[in-house]
Structure formats: C-alpha cells, structure tokens
Amino acid sequence: MSLKKEISKQEVMNVLLAACPSYKNRWLQYYKENYDDSEEQLLYSELTDFAYHFIDLYKHNQISEFPRIFEVIELLHTDGDDYVKEAATIGLLEDIQNLALGEDINPDVFKQYLKPETQKWWIILNDFWNGKTENIGGPIK
C-alpha cells in the first residue's frame, strides 16, 4: 500500500507554474477571462493554453525552463491520478506536438527533454497518429 499522494487535477496548474514562472502572467489573464469563483476549472483547456505558451517560449529561444517543465510532465505521468495521467498525454503532450507542427516546428526537437515515462507516451501518441495503433495505448497493428 502506497502512502504517496497522487497529483489531482486541481493541483496540476500550480505544479506547472512552479516549473515555469514565465507562464504566471498569461495564466492569471487566462483565469480572469475564463472563470469566476464558482466555476469548475477545465484542465484540458488550461493545458492547451500552457502548450501555446510552451511553443511561444521555443519560438523565442527561451528554453531555460524546459528541463523543469519536462520534469513536471514526467511527474504528472508517474504521480498523477488517472485523470491527470491521461491529461498529461492527451491534454499536454498531444497539444505540444500538434501546435509545434502548426508552427512548422518538428516536435522531435523536444525529445531531448523527455524523461522515461513521458517518452513512452510521446511514442504512443506518434504511433496512434501514424496509424500504427487504433487507439492511444492500444496494440500495434
């Protein structure tokens, strides 16, 4: 039995902000524009906004936060609850890959930062989009 606390969806953005302080002002603006105090936060939308910030950092060669960002992405994959683990792949990695392609950036430039569990899911996403599997995490055709 593990006594280790899993990362919940309510904690994800704070963990990302700790790793990527450059996102703070954009996050505050995003939050102000999208929520009032009574609304539930939508993690997948938040991760998409973070992915846009991440790609902007890359485009401006501001990559000093990347090692910490990918440490957090790994942590989300290893220590997140089931929802967080899925969101780390579908909501963040997939957005990073797609947004990079939309900006004519080869997503492989980020592979150097991938930790073991994140790398596994990065490859699984690629296998899915390349038609090697019918679903994310499914058997290879």
Image: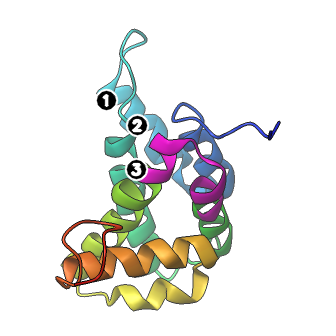
Closer to viewer: mark 2 or mark 3: 3
- The residue range painted magenta reads 74-86
Work out whether mark 3 precedes mark 1 in sequence or the reverse, and give the earlier one.
Answer: 1
Residue, disc 1: 33
Work out whether mark 2 precedes mark 3 in sequence or the reverse, and give the earlier one.
Answer: 2
Q: Position of residue 36 (x, y in %)?
A: 37, 15
Q: Residue at x 40, y 66 (%)?
A: 93
Residue, disc 3: 47
Q: Residue at x 40, y 50 (%)?
A: 47
Q: Is residue 135 visible?
A: yes
Res 92 label? none
Residue, disc 2: 29
Q: Position of residue 86 (x, y in %)?
A: 42, 52
Instruction: Looking at the picture, tell me which residue is in the foreground, 78 or 96.
Output: 78
Say few, some or many: other residues with alpha carbon within 10 Å of mark 2 (under 14 / 14 to 19 / 20 or more).
few
Q: Is residue 32 above or below residue 4?
A: above
Q: Position of residue 43 (x, y in %)?
A: 40, 39
Quarter of the image with the C terminus is bottom left
Q: Residue at x 45, y 41 (%)?
A: 83
Q: Residue at x 44, y 46 (%)?
A: 26
Report if the CB atoms under discs 2 and 1 are less than 8 Å apart: yes
Q: Element type at marker 2? A: helix
Say few, some or many: other residues with alpha carbon within 10 Å of mark 3 (under 14 / 14 to 19 / 20 or more).
many
